[in-house]
Amino acid sequence: MKKFLLIFMLCPLLTVMSCRDNTATSNETAPSVSADANLNSMEAALEKELYASNAQMPMQVDYATTLNSVTRDGKVVTYEYVIDEGVFNFDDIIARNEDFKANLKEQIKLMSSPDSEVYTFMSLLKKTGKDLRYLYKGKSTGKTMTIVITNDELKELIQDY
């Protein structure tokens, strides 16, 4: 179960598409560009990343986990996963929800070095005021587990360099 936990926590982070090229101009705005124009540019970069990510879906992450989509609904970006309950007891996963969230936050923090794709994507979420939600669904039962990392939590995790 511990090996699965590590894979389960890293998968959402490793499947993030690189948005470095798309956001470089967003972060280097001229003084005459308004904050609204900069935000609009970052929103457009985020939409482009979500579109590019979804073009690769569904994605088999490991032998029990499939990433179905990465979507945005208003201020929430959601990774939606399906877990094969024939491999793992989903009730055990649900029971460890808080542990999963703590591990996810730690992994986000550790993987967010200034030159990483994770940092670039998480910074984009942070700057556009988005929350990050991980939705896990059991394949056979349809049970769900949701982990939300709020924008305030992202602001604490992701430093500005």
Image: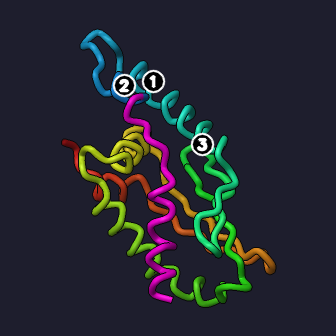
Task: Tell me where residue 47 appears, x and y as whole percent.
Answer: 56, 34
- What residue is disc 2 on? 26
Quarter location, residue 146: bottom right
x 68%, y 50%: residue: 57
Q: Residue furthest left?
A: 161
**Mark positioned earlier in the residue sequence (1 or 2):** 2
- Please, what secondary structure does the residue beneath circle 2 have? helix
The region drawn magenta spans 1-21
The residue beneath circle 1 is 41
Name the foreground residue: 125 vs 14: 14
Amino acid on which the number 3 mark rests in the picture: Gly
Q: Do the residues labelled 1 and 2 touch (CB within 8 Å)?
A: yes
**How busy is the neighbourhood of tag 1: few (under 14 within 10 Å), some, or many (20 plus)?**
some
**Does residue 58 sit above or below 99 in this rendering?**
above
The residue drawn where x is 72% and y is 76% is: 138
The location of residue 117, given as percent across then percent down, is: 37, 46
- Disc 1 to disc 2, how far (Cα)? 6 Å
In the picture provided, is 4 more to the left or to the right than 104?
Answer: right
The kind of secondary structure the magenta stretch mainly shows is: helix
Report the label total.
Answer: 3
Residue drawn at x 31%, y 47% as measured from the top left: 116
Name the mark nearer the viewer: 2 or 3. Answer: 2
